[in-house]
Amino acid sequence: MAVRPVLRMGHPHLLRVAEPVSEFDTPELHAVLQDMFDTMAARNGVGLAAPQIDINLRIVIFGFDQNPRYPEAEPVPQTVLINPQIKVLDQAQEPGWEGCLSVPGLRGLVSRYQHIRYSGYDALGQRIEREVSGFHARVVQHEVDHLDGLLYPRRMGDLSQFGFVEELEAARNPA
Ligand code: NI
């Protein structure tokens, strides 16, 4: 059980394409997942990808009931998703604010597909398949991007909507 350091934007390992997991339900895999959950909880994350703790495997976790960093987001079930795949069900995209534990203190407005089906495997190797929309779909797209070496600023079209959380909140709620 350990909270691991989270790599920050600029670290070259965040740019790698991660490797598929080939063996499930191993002590090594369970240990990686425990460290990921401990690290996500310690940082109030809504999701985390293994490359963020410098593990080059196609593993993401996500989920929360209530999150102080996204107080208005609807709950997302706690999920381990290994070797994920995303199918876009509707080409419609929607802008939404995203942060990332690898880009601390900042937020950006990012367009994501609203409606997707995702699939993959849990820690035991059992298949998961879900059709989701809204914030749930956004979180999955954000986390899966990490496995392909992509951080959300590279998904942004308009960098004027990228800034420090405190400044963005002050601008939205003038005193
Ligand atoms: Ni992230």
Image (tube, rainbow, N blue to C red):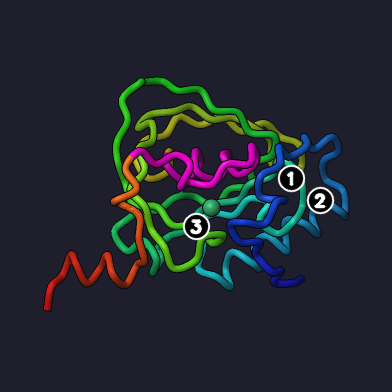
Crowding at dot 1, Cα within 10 Å, few <14 / some 14-19 / many 20+, comes out as some
Give, as a three-letter code, the residue at label 2: Leu
> Is-magenta flag for residue 151?
yes
Q: Name the residue tied to disc 2.
A: 29
Dot 1 or dot 3, earlier in sequence = 3
Image position of 7 with respect to 85: above or below = below
Marks 1 & 2, CB-CB < 8 Å contact = yes
- For residue 123, the mark is 1
Residue 157's disc number: none
Residue type of the residue flagged with mark 1: Ala
Q: Secondary structure at mark 1?
A: loop
Residue at the spot x=35%, y=21% of the render? 91
The answer to whether the residue bearing label 2 lies less than 8 angstroms from the nearest atom of ligand 1 is no
Across and down, in percent, residue 139 comes to 46, 46
Residue 151 percent across, percent down from the top left: 54, 47
Q: CA distance from mark 1 to mark 3?
A: 24 Å
Of badges 1 and 3, the one in the foreground is 3
Instruction: Check residue 100 in the rendering and tell me which mark sits there, or answer none.
Output: 3
Residue 46: x percent and y percent? Answer: 49, 57
In the picture shown, does residue 148 fall above or below 10? Answer: above
Label 3, secondary structure: give it: loop
Locate the N terminus and report the quarter of the image it occupies: bottom right
